[in-house]
Image: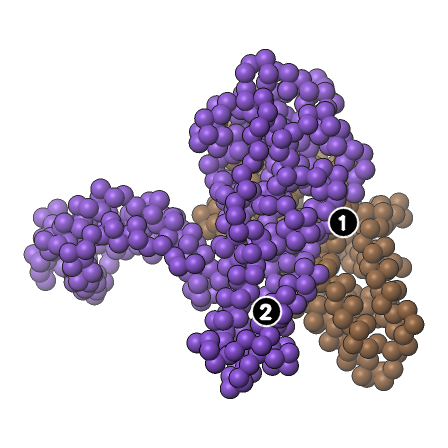
Amino acid sequence: MFENLSERLERSLKLLKGEGKITEINVAETLKEVRRALLDADVNFKTAKTFTETVKEKALGQNVLSALKPGQMMVKLVHDELAELMGRTNVDINLKGSPAVILMAGLQGSGKTTMSGKLAKLLKSKRGKNPLLAACDVYRPAAIDQLKVLGEQINVPVFADLESKDPVKIALAALKQAKLNGHDVLIVDTAGRLAIDEQMMKEITNIKDALNPSEILFVVDSMTGQDAVNTAKEFNDRLNFDGVVLTKLDGDTRGGAALSIRSVVNKPIKFVGTGEKLDALDVFHPERMADRILGMGDIVSLVERAQEQYDVEEARKLQKKIAKNQFNFNDFISQIQQIKKMGNLKDLASMIPGVGKALKNIDIDDDAFKSIEAIIYSMTPLERENPELINGTRRKRIADGSGTTIQDVNQLLKQFTETKKMMKMMSGGKNMARMMSNMKMPN
Amino acid sequence: MGIFSFFTKEKKQQLDKGLEKTKESVLKKITRSVVGKTTVDDDVLDDLEEILISSDVGVDTTLKIIKRIESRVKDEKYFGANELNSILKEEIAALLSENEQSTFSGEFNTNEKPYVIMVVGVNGVGKTTTIGKLAHLFKSEGKTVVLGAADTFRAAAVDQLSIWADRVGVSIIKQEMGADPASVAFDTVTSAKSSNADVVIIDTAGRLHNKVNLMNELTKIKRVMQKVIPNAPHEILLVLDGSTGQNAFEQAKQFTLATEVNALAMTKLDGTAKGGVVIGISDQFKIPVKYIGVGEGIEDLQIFNKKEYVNSLFGS
């Protein structure tokens, strides 16, 4: 439903064409679009206003002629300013203390328990830590069970006391247990609470005072709207938290809350949750978040995902085959499998700037490859290795076997030949693996 | 009146209390913006814009409301800014009542037995809690309720629903964690049918609306239930978190595409979140808001009443 900022700006910047300089008058419409884009992304009303003012200050007087395209210049200005505001550098969590105590706090349903599990897994597998999880949500039914199940999945012990209804006591007992068993990190999961619930806010302050945590993380749902500011401020006033964790970023929310929170409490965003699996935890990338808020796709994540699934050894073999012009249908289908491994096609496509909107109402899923696969699987092994063997009668048989038509088969063969040609051209002595690893985005 | 005729004054006070924070700040802002002014000028409209946007009403809906007010200023030549409060209320109520035909009538179609409700939504909006409260609501009306624990994915979700079933005193059909949710739903409706239960409520795992496979799973759960009861589920309830911003639109859109959502529930309205996005959603998708959650207690679920909601937002 939202147009991305560059599209909006292109329209409004028509006003700027032919003007020598950006002035208060000719940039007004453009700034309105900037503000609108921010509000659509759930950036807080006041934050959006202040931000637009800042952008205006920076844009005024700039020479339009010197910039290749004024639209691009404005987008860059807005983008850079956003990234700047959300923090250029990454701030790590503080793991000092024995054990280091990490306290999780936030509203109901923001994802504290899942995030506690993810964090424990990260610290254990990537930092060589020996964490203990403490279940201090005594209110929500089965919250303790939930943490226990997660603990089992990642093989991290969970401290719980089903008899006690006092989170402070449970937290202290967990701390004692951690010391006793030589855990170097204690992650304390707490109940979700509303910022206006005096009793519950007092409770978490008491937990903080009792444990003296080295790191307090405020967990917030990335889909949160205007209220993000109030909640973050209230939690920060009470807890003076050290960092923010943004969850559910694998959805399609623009996530303007990230900017609002940052600008109100000025605390770094340290982690983002990007999926339901327990390793779906990522460090925060301000640049990508800026793109996202502006609705400009996330090409960097796309490239990263491609690289993750990319098998260097396989690629080297493939590259040799291409060079010798031996690329065949077996290779073709293994390429398709690789693409499919990267995830849902629509998700992937939507990360490409500009494409997301175009595809909005078109349903493409993994079925897109179904008929291609069927055709290839209906070929004999000999045919797959030697596509040039496929003559008229073979085509008829393949079409019948795959439930497609001869036209479909012809089309695939044509596509295949073209792909082969293109790959030969692209490879031209260059190493594919190197090409992939060089695919870094300019900043 | 139907089974929900107990929406009494007591309940209304609770709604007022839940939305108190909203009311105070909105009224304060409006009052501040109209003090010492006699006409609706641009400053007042700007302030109004801020109030609405800050309540998550969204840019489109806000512009729509402001346009209506502006045209009324033109048509009626002049009106004092102190009338703004009631005019604003009227205009928002008008947006909400445009889908009057689908307004919750206060009773469900009792010809359907069991009446099957499937509850869907993204992660962490409060589906399971809402189901617990909903079961209590039906039970207190003397209905027999069967819950179906078809969230077999999230750790301990089945336990959470079981605790609610115990608390409310209704039966629950469940399988192991990781079981096929469609199979749980099938078992639940089969059991409810043979025990002649009045209401079935199916819990489903939270899922982000942009995950095609997970959305397809919902379609499957629905289809499988229809093998037992052809027009089940009679109600597909999308639960929205009251603190969610504009993404709620996309949620409403995608869940509607996958499962033909025909009712909404807004949760967590007892916090500082305003839930204003519901105005736009109601306007755009013509799906009625049926329930609102205003606390964690078993009684803290209310039948949504558009007029009262608007009144509570702006004071009555």
- Which element type, helix, strand or loop, lies under badge 2? helix
Label disc, if present, on residue B272 of the rendered structure:
1
The chain under label 1 reads B
Quick check: A144 left or right of B179?
right
Q: Residue furthest bottom?
A: A18
Please, is residue A422 above or below residue B273 in the view? below
| Screen quadrant of the C terminus of chain B | bottom right
Q: Name the quadrant containing residue B34.
A: bottom right
Image position, residue B235 (x, y; %): 63, 49
Q: Colour of chain B?
A: brown
Q: Name the quadrant containing residue B95.
A: bottom right
Q: Amino acid at mark 1?
A: Thr
Q: Amino acid at mark 2?
A: Lys
Label disc, if present, on residue A58 of the rendered structure:
2
Image position, residue B178 (x, y; %): 48, 32
Calculate the distance from the C-alpha at mark 2 to the C-alpha at mark 1: 35 Å
Q: Which chain is purple?
A: A
Crowdedness near tag 1: few (<14), some (14–19) or many (≥20) residues, C-alpha within 10 Å = many
Quick check: B275 left or right of A33?
right
